[in-house]
Image: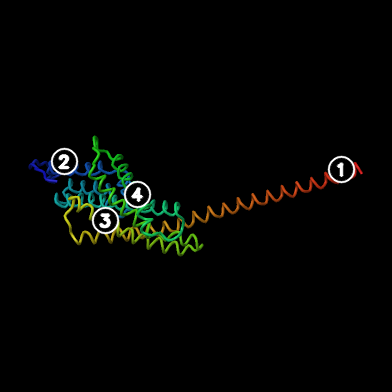
Amino acid sequence: MACTISSMNSYDGGIKINSSESRYLSQRLESIKDEQGFLGNIWNGIKEVTNLGQSASDCDSMLQKFNSGEISFEEAVEYIDNFDTKQENMSGLLSNILTGTVAIASTILTIGTGPIGWTVALLKGAPIGAAVKTGINLLDRATNNIEGDELDVKQIAKDVVSGAMTGATSAVSSGVGAGIKAGKIGISLLNGAKCGVVCGAASGAGSYLTDVAFGDKEFDSGELLANTATSAFVSGTVGTAVGGGMYGIANLAGNVGKDVAKSTAQAIVSDSTSSMARKALGQAEKNVLFA
């Protein structure tokens, strides 16, 4: 962001402070915070708790360091800009992960645990992915703190394209159901990880190339590789958790269903036995009384 900063200086305990630079940094940081929707806030919250990566609190600390003369203006700007870039990238990655997860679950629920081909993936996964990613990003935008933030038709078009790619890839690469069908959690974990890597790499590359196609970014092979690798790694980790989680849910539901079925069968048998016994006793009474 280009800006003109005047040389308005003040002194605090012998430390020279440029009030215009300080004000610029404060406004820049507040603007970034306001842009955060629920995805950005979730990721920032994770970093605040785990202390992994740059968080909003870390940026506040850097601003204080600038005001106390510990760091330069350029260092503070670079730190805050890095926070903005990482928040934006991770929000996009979370959106892709959620889209892929919903596409996997929805496809398995609608067509079962068998192999999923490209035809089914395009018919099922692609429209689910397009709808889910568009909805997630609209909700993310609706939950930011920017007043009068207008609907971006171009962004929606990008979400439809990249969401369809993520949905189709997630559906066709899904092998989580095989572990559920075989009754082996190891298969679900492994296939979940493989699925996560495949659809993560595809969605990371797809989202980047979509930005390039719409003119929002200039193509850079290094940046494409970084987006693809990062998305593949994170999605692979999430895919492992999804595979284990879906296996657990399926088995829990299956065991509950078996228990209900067993109890129902026992109740039916007991009731039938009681009915037969009552009929036999009734018939015996009739025979005795009317003999």
Q: Nearer the viewer, residue 233 or 200?
A: 200
Q: Residue at x 50, y 55 (%)?
A: 250
Q: How many marks?
A: 4
Give the residue at mark 1.
286
Which quarter of the figure has residue 168?
bottom left
Residue bearing the label numbered 2: 23
- From the image, tell me which residue sits under label 3: 206
Work out how far the residue at label 2 is from the one at label 1, CA to CA, in angstroms: 102 Å
Q: Reading the chain from its start, which is encountered first: label 1 or label 4?
A: 4
Q: Nearer the viewer, mark 2 or mark 1?
A: 1
Residue at screen point 32% across, 58% down: 200
Q: Comparing marks 1 and 3, which lies closer to the viewer? A: 1
Q: Residues within 10 Å of mark 4 (few under 14, many from 20)?
A: some
Tell me the residue that label 4 is attached to.
127
Q: Could you tell me which secondary element the residue under label 4 belongs to?
A: helix
The residues bearing labels 1 and 3 have C-alpha atoms spaced at a distance of 82 Å
Residue type at mark 2: give it. Arg
Task: Pick whichever, 65 or 164, lies toward us.
Answer: 164
Q: Which mark is residue 167?
A: none
